[in-house]
Amino acid sequence: MPDVLKAPLVVEFPFTRSLGPVQRAFLTGLRERVVLGVRTTDGRTLVPPVEYDPVTAEEIRDLVEVAPTGTVTTWAWNHAPRRGQPLRTPFAWVLVRLDGADTALLHALDAPGPDAVRTGMRVRVRWAGERSGAITDIACFEPYDGEAGEPGAHHGDFADPVTGIVAPARLDYTYTPGRAQTAHLDALAERRTVGERCPSCRKVYVPPRGACPTCGVATSEQVEVGPRGTVTTFCVVNIKARNLDIEVPYVYAHIALDGADLALHGRIGGIPYDQVRMGLRVEPVWPEGARHPDHYRPTGEPDADYDTYRELL
């Protein structure tokens, strides 16, 4: 049995969002070293602020300033900080109820060790040296044994308010394709396409998953398919992806390889995008030294009859 493959993968994208009046004031306040909450009709002050009362669902806009000091209500020690977290050295995640607030704010506490952290301890905000209107303008909290801070009287009116934020989302993980897909990928490195046949319904699935998605039984019989196939459906891509050196517009299609009972994905090249069509016969193009086809191009054969691939749409 061949060694099972594995590879580190990263899924990353920036999430851009506009801000409503409450969040706009809250983040702009952090830029100006002011912590704002929002007061509900029954007198509670919520920090961080929200635009609707979580109890009554009533819209709330009454912004009030709270103190930069507070009390830890609960905590957990982070002994191995990860990429993008507030501190590079071990720290505590804490919920802090700021003086003047009725709810707690989640952030990092810079402490020498877990023995230095306790529920009920007093802390204060440590502001970042450079602030832009983000939660990271609070660099972290730090232990504090002084008097409670006095909140100001700010009500959220700022010059040049923050109107939007970009929040990066990133997931690092190790992908292991398993026995079936490892065999499939190894075959691609030899410029062959291999699927697996279900022992019950006899359908051939490419790429294989190790089990039939219809019958739910394990598959092990390998079947070589293609290399030619038929375009079943497709879309025209007009937005250029970052780090993908392909000029738009281009076509991405479902391709039913000869002998397969499941269409796979592939880019169509060697033909103007507006000439790609259902039923187009295509073949893979393998760059020198590549482990998989770069794209599929027309074979020059007559288009396949619709009845030959309609079950694979």
Image (spheres, grey):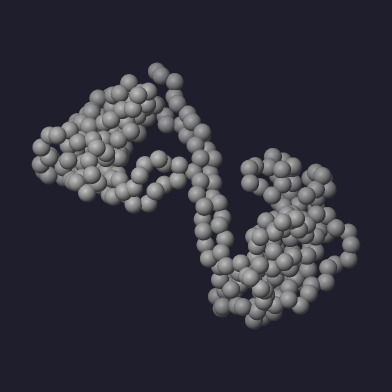
What x and y, as percent, mark residue 177? 42, 31
Position of residue 186 in the picture relative to residue 230 (left or right): right
Residue found farthest to the right: 146
Task: Tell me what residue is drawn at x 70 percent, y 59 percent.
Answer: 131
Task: Give residue 147's position: percent from left, percent from top.
Answer: 88, 66
Left or right relative to 43: residue 175: left
In which quadrant will I find the N terminus? top left
Query: Residue 150: horizontal and vertical position, in percent?
Result: 83, 71
Instruction: Tell me how many marks there are.
Output: 0
The quadrant holding residue 257 is: top left
Between 165 and 86, the one lying in front of the other is 165
Tell me if residue 94 can be seen: no
Residue 76 left/right relative to 307: right
Looking at the image, which is closer to me, 245 or 214?
Answer: 245
For this rendering, which residue is in front, 244 or 122? Answer: 244
Outermost top residue: 1
Instruction: Identify which residue is drawn at 30% across, 35% down.
Output: 295
Q: Is residue 141 above or below residue 151?
A: above
* Quarter-of-image position of residue 98: bottom right
Q: Is residue 248 visible?
A: yes
Residue in the picture at 23% in, 44% down: 272
Q: Is residue 236 above or below residue 120?
A: above
Residue 70 as seen in the image, left or right of residue 201: right
At a point 28% along the width and 45% down the height, the residue shown is 251
Question: Residue 58 at what x, y percent from top left?
Answer: 56, 78
On the image, which quarter does residue 104 sit in?
bottom right
Which residue is most to the bottom? 41
